[in-house]
Image (cartoon, rainbow, N blue to C red):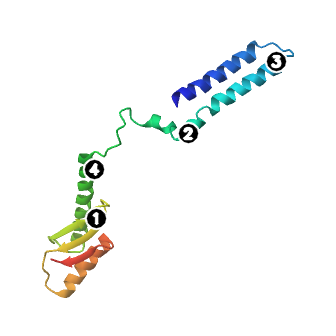
Amino acid sequence: MSAWLISIVGVVSLGVLIEIVLPDGDNTKYIRGIFSVIVIFVIIAPLPKMLKGDFFKEFASEDGAQIEIDEEYYQAVRDSIHQSVIDGLNEKLSSNGYENVDFDVTFDENYAYAVEKVVVKSSFASEEEWQRVKKIISEYVGRATVEKG
């Protein structure tokens, strides 16, 4: 593709040079016409490659390798997201007066930020208290399942 762009720039530069040097006369319109056809051919030259699908192979790596995910970085980002969700949930519970609530969070494997299930291990004095905690957690995590563990 870079060769194609260079050839377009070269042909246009040559056209400007010819326009400057070319004297006015009877043959000027024929020379301009021929040069216009050359410019058109240079511009449409990569079209057959594009239609075959070979044109975009220039953007692939030279050894044909595919793009790979850096697993360590991906896992570090995923862990950071998970920890921020857990910290946010702890903060939400603390702000509503529930300190030291023990829970496990299960995240969706396909989406790093999506919580699948929250299992609360702590025991509560009454069913009403459990329902309040469950409501707080449900509001924070959305559609995730909240259950006692």
Please rate how many residues cluster around mark 2, counting C-alpha atoms within 10 Å: few if below 14, some from 14 to 19, many from 20.
few
- Residue 108's tag is 1
Q: CA distance from mark 4 to mark 1?
A: 15 Å
Q: Amino acid at mark 1?
A: Asp
Q: Position of residue 146 (x, y in %)?
A: 24, 76
Check disc 2 and report the residue beneath it. 50
Q: Which mark is residue 28?
A: 3
The amino acid marked with disc number 4 is Tyr
Bin the neighbour count of mark 3 within 10 Å (Cα to Cα): few under 14, some 14-19, many 20 and up: few
Whether residue 8 sits left or right of residue 140 in the image: it is: right
Q: Which mark is residue 125?
A: none
Instruction: Say whether disc 2 or disc 3 marks the residue closer to the N-terminus.
Output: 3
Dot 3 or dot 4, earlier in sequence: 3
Type of amino acid under label 2: Met
Q: Position of residue 52 (x, y in %)?
A: 54, 40
| Location of residue 88 by image quarter | bottom left
